[in-house]
Structure formats: structure tokens, C-alpha cells
Image (cartoon, rainbow, N blue to C red):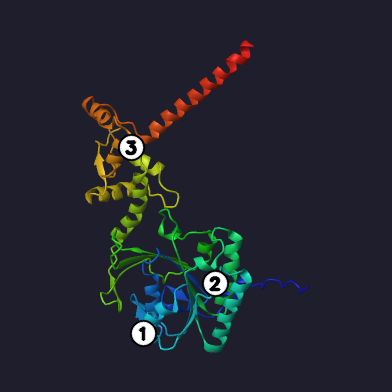
Amino acid sequence: MSPIESPQVLWDQDVAASAGDAADWLWHGILARKNLTMLTSLWKSGKTTLIAHLLGSRGQAGELLGLAVKPGKTAVISEESRELWADRIRHWSVHGQVCFFLRPFAHIPTPAEWRALLEHVGRLHDEHGLDVVIIDPLAPLLPCENEGRTVHEFLLPLRALTERGLAALICHHPRKRAAAASEASRGHGSLLSHADVLLDMRYGDSSRHSRVRRLSCRSRYSATPARLVFELNADGAGYTVHPVDEDTEDFRGFWDALRKVLEDAPQKFTRLDILDEWPEDFDKPDAGTLYRMLCRAVEDNLVLKEGAGRKSDPFRYWLPESVARWKKENLLYDVLEHHRKTLNLPFTPYREQKRINEEADRDLRRMDEELAKEPAEAE
């Protein structure tokens, strides 16, 4: 039995004396030696196209999305076929700098098989100076992305590889339900915590035909841009980077969560109702931010609003399409709305309606319990 190796001990002065910058960027702010970057985006939304442009930029010193790219050799572990990559290589000259592992497994690999593949990549690093490994995508290589131990068995040998001086880029898919950009990746939280740079790429608007993409970034490093907005040129040969409107980008992140709240709403919601029902996967705004963002949504005709802002008549909000759903669910909807308006009845917020319903349920349960006791007492 081999002896157990003790972890290396470093005192603070030893750590502080380490030479070099915090990150050696191969794609500035995005991809660095000894670091792991995770790119999350929908299927067929442009991840592999972006990777192909990165490979082309690494053929010689250049830039991508306005960020400097250093030349170097790359290993690509891909689920796509040789024929698809042949077309890309002919389109983007990579100057003999890319090594491919195309569909390396006919099954989900065992931990031993996965380590063996990464050891092969490590030998390429030693023999050919390869400095980037790209995994596109993660799903075919991971037996269970929701199980912590399985995720660690995947990530730890990859982290050992990056410690040898490589940069790793993992492409992944988002969870089904809406989530904030920093939490969009599906699977166990270890996937996010291990990554040094998190990238979330989404369509620029509601159209899946749009060539505009929005990249939200979270990172351990200040060099990473918070956001990038870019558009694939019509000929597919490059990207145009657009200026980032911070107010618009902040609103887009807010709108994803607000739409989720209002899509599920059983009635018109006050601001307090909205905050009560805010999804846990999104950062909850403060009251002032919520008000400003709701005003923006109303101005853009994304949300409808009524009320006078008083206690008996608070502002309330709903999606334009929600009324049709409510009418279908409640045939008396129009009658009740008419009576409330003509009789000037106070509006009951959802949080108050929930309290009333909960009290009614408790009363009914209490009555049922009392009725159940009566026969026993009679006996």
C-alpha cells in the first residue's frame, strides 16, 4: 500500500512571494492558464461557432470579441463528427495548431477512462506545448451531473491538468427553468464553484434567428468583462462587438425573473406580491430597484399596470396575456372584476388572499377533527 502524501503547506509569506501575475490570459479576461472557464448556453445557440473562431484566432496572435488572444495549441474534446469539423477547419485556418478527440467514447466514460484521456492530453502538453483543452459539451462525459461525488471525479483530474499550466474551457447546457446568469448551468453546484470564470451566453432578443448574443460573466478576476454584446457577421467570418448599455442589460436580467413570476401569477400582483414570489434562483431586488424596473416594463408595454398607489388601491401588475388565462380558469372573472370596479371594492393582494385561504383551511381541518371525535365520544 503506497504511503499517503501530506498536502503541501505554504505560509503567507511564501504565497505572497510567488512570482507572476494572478492570471496568464490566453484569451484576455476569459481563458487563462491554470484556470477553468465554463461557458453555458442553449443547444445550437453558437457555442461551437464561438469556439471555432477562438481556434482560428489562436493560429496567430489576434483578438476575439475585442479581447486579445495569444497563439498556441489546443486540444478539443467534441461530440461532433469529423465531417462537421472538417468544414470549420477549411473555413477558419488553424495553422496546424489543433488536436481533436472526436467522439472519443462510445459510452459515458468511467472515471478511469476519463483520467486516461486527460493523461493523454497532458502528454500532448509535455511533447507539443499544448496549452488549452476545450470540452464541448460536458454532458456526454458525465454519468450524473447532479451527483456531487461524480462531478468531483470529473473535475479533480481536470483541475490537476490545469495545474500543469493548461487552460480549460467547458461548454455546458442550462437548466430547464429560468435562472440568473451566474446559476444557469444545470447540475450540481460543484460545477459552478470549481470554475474560475463563468460565462452565460444568451440570444440577443426573443428571436432564435438573431445573430446577436449577450455574454454575462462572473469571475475571480477583475480583468473579466461583466458583459459583452456581439453579433455574428452575415458571412460568418467574424463578430461585431456592440456597446453595452448597462441599464438595458440590468433590465434584461430582471425581466427574466419578473416574467417567470407573472407567468405563474393567479391574479394581478402588487410589488410586495412580486417580491414574495421572487424565484430563489435570482437575486431579489430591493423595493426601489423593483419599482424602477417595473416602470421600465410598463413603458415598454411588457407589463400592464393599474391602481392609484393607495393602501386600498395599490399599484398592481400583470402580463397582457394573463387575463385570457384567468378568464379560462374562472368563468366568473369578468363579473367579479365588474362588481369590484362599479362598487369600488378594495383590492385584495395575493399575500392577503393566501393568508385568508390558509386560515380557512385551518378552520376546515379543525372542524373535520371535531366531527371525527363526536362519534367516538357518543360511544
The residue tagged 2 is 106
Q: Could you tell me how far apart the alpha carbons at marks 2 and 3 are, in whole angstroms?
A: 51 Å
Please report whichever mark, 1 or 3, sits nearer to the chain's N-terminal start.
Answer: 1
For this orientation, the residue located farthest to the right is 1
User: Can residue 13 be spotted in the picture?
Assistant: no
Is label 1 in contact with label 3 (beta carbons under 8 Å)? Answer: no
Is residue 8 positioned above or below 71 on the image? above
| Left/right of residue 174 with respect to residue 145 in the rendered view | left
Q: Quadrant of the N terminus?
A: bottom right
Question: Based on the displayed image, in which of its 4 quarters is residue 174 positioned?
Answer: bottom left
The residue under the point 62% across, 69% down is: 111
Question: Based on the displayed image, in which of its 4 quarters is residue 179 positioned?
Answer: bottom left
Is label 2 in contact with label 3 (beta carbons under 8 Å)? Answer: no
| Left/right of residue 341 with respect to residue 127 in the rendered view | left
Crowd tier of the residue under label 1, counting other residues whose Cα lies within 10 Å: few below 14, some 14–19, many 20 or above: few
Q: Could you tell me how far apart the alpha carbons at marks 1 and 3 are, in whole angstroms?
A: 56 Å
| Left/right of residue 243 with respect to residue 105 in the rendered view | left
Question: What is the x, y in percent for residue 197?
Answer: 46, 68
| Left/right of residue 349 with respect to residue 196 in the rendered view | left
The residue tagged 3 is 267
Element under disc 2: loop
Element under disc 3: loop
Please report whichever mark, 2 or 3, sits nearer to the chain's N-terminal start.
Answer: 2
Is residue 369 positioned above or below 39 on the image? above
Q: Quadrant of the C terminus?
A: top right
The residue under the point 33% across, 37% down is: 267
The residue tagged 1 is 90
Question: Based on the displayed image, in which of its 4 quarters is residue 202 positioned?
Answer: bottom left
